[in-house]
Image (tube, rainbow, N blue to C red):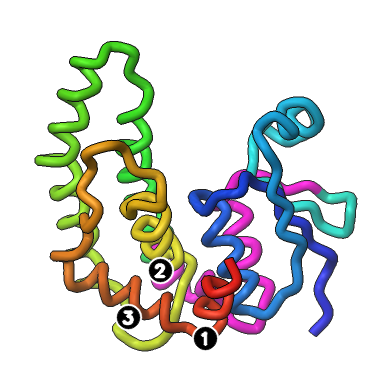
Amino acid sequence: MTFPKFKLTYWDAKIRAEPIRLAFAINGIPFEDERVSREHFAAELKQSAPFGQVPILTVDDKLVLAQSTAILRYVGKIGPVKLYPEDPIKAIIADQLISHVQDIESALGAAFVFTDLQQRDAYRANLTANVLPTRLKQLDEFIAQHVSQSDEITIGDLYVYQLNTGFLTTTGFAFTGQPKNSVAGFEHIQKVVEKVKSHPAVAEWEARH
């Protein structure tokens, strides 16, 4: 199978780009993994980037695509493994997983924006004690009810995996005092994480990065 020339531009971090990188890897699609500093992006790329942000995917050196979820859906459609399911019910299940994970990530991201330290600490305490456990329980129950227990992987599974590796770990996007094993007690989330982690292409990618 012949593919266009792809260049994925993002920070040297997992977060929004990692599900896209894994989608390329699972399908064996070659791509340039361009990792830029925020300074380089601000000086050289921001003005021309759609919506002024990354990730961006450049196709054949001319078409520039933006918005991480849109890019992920695109990559999930073009390879031999249809990570974005053609079946509309399976597709909307994947979309719901992504939307819920994004809600969790937004709540985590908000923990960094406070200038008032008392407000920040109160927000983080409530997030840790109430918000995060509730959202993860909802995610675990949704996976138990709707996500296939087969080896089939979707872009929704990639988002769940990245929530664990990019946001809820000591090496990921975590604030001081945030529990580092947030998903440890959620059986069905862990099953999805393990399913993705054990895929040979993902294991190879992780070993090299």
Instruction: Please tell me which of labels 2 and 3 falls first in the chain.
Output: 3
Residue 81 circle label = none
The residue lying furthest to the right in this view is 61
Instruction: Look at the numbered disc 1 and give the secondary structure of its residue.
Output: helix
Classify the position of the N terminus by image quarter: bottom right
Q: Is residue 165 left or right of residue 209?
A: left
Whole-percent x, y for residue 32 in the image? 77, 61
- Which circle's residue, 3 or 1, is located before the other in the chain? 3
Q: Is residue 187 visible?
A: yes
> Label 1 near label 3: C-beta < 8 Å?
no
Q: Position of residue 60 (x, y in %)?
A: 88, 59
Residues under labels 3 and 1: Cα distance? 19 Å
Provide the secondary structure element on which disc 2 rests.
helix
In the rendered image, which residue does mark 3 sit on? 148
For residue 102, above or below residue 7: above
Q: Residue at x 25, y 16 (%)?
A: 117
Q: From the image, tell me which residue sits under label 2.
A: 157
Q: Quadrant of residue 125?
A: top left
Instruction: Name the element at disc 3.
Output: loop
How busy is the neighbourhood of tag 3: few (under 14 within 10 Å), some, or many (20 plus)? few
From the top left corner, tell me how far across and down residue 102 is, in percent. 39, 46
Q: Which residues are magenta?
A: 64-92
| Marks 2 and 3 close (CB-CB < 8 Å) | no
Task: State the residue lying farthest toward the top.
Answer: 116
> Which residue bears the numbered disc 1?
200
Three-letter amino acid code of the residue under disc 3:
Ser
Q: CA distance from mark 1 to mark 2?
A: 15 Å
- Crowd band around label 1 with a 10 angstrom C-alpha radius: few (<14), some (14–19), many (20+): few
Q: Is residue 187 above or below residue 100?
A: below
> Mark 2 or mark 1, which is nearer the start of the sequence?
2
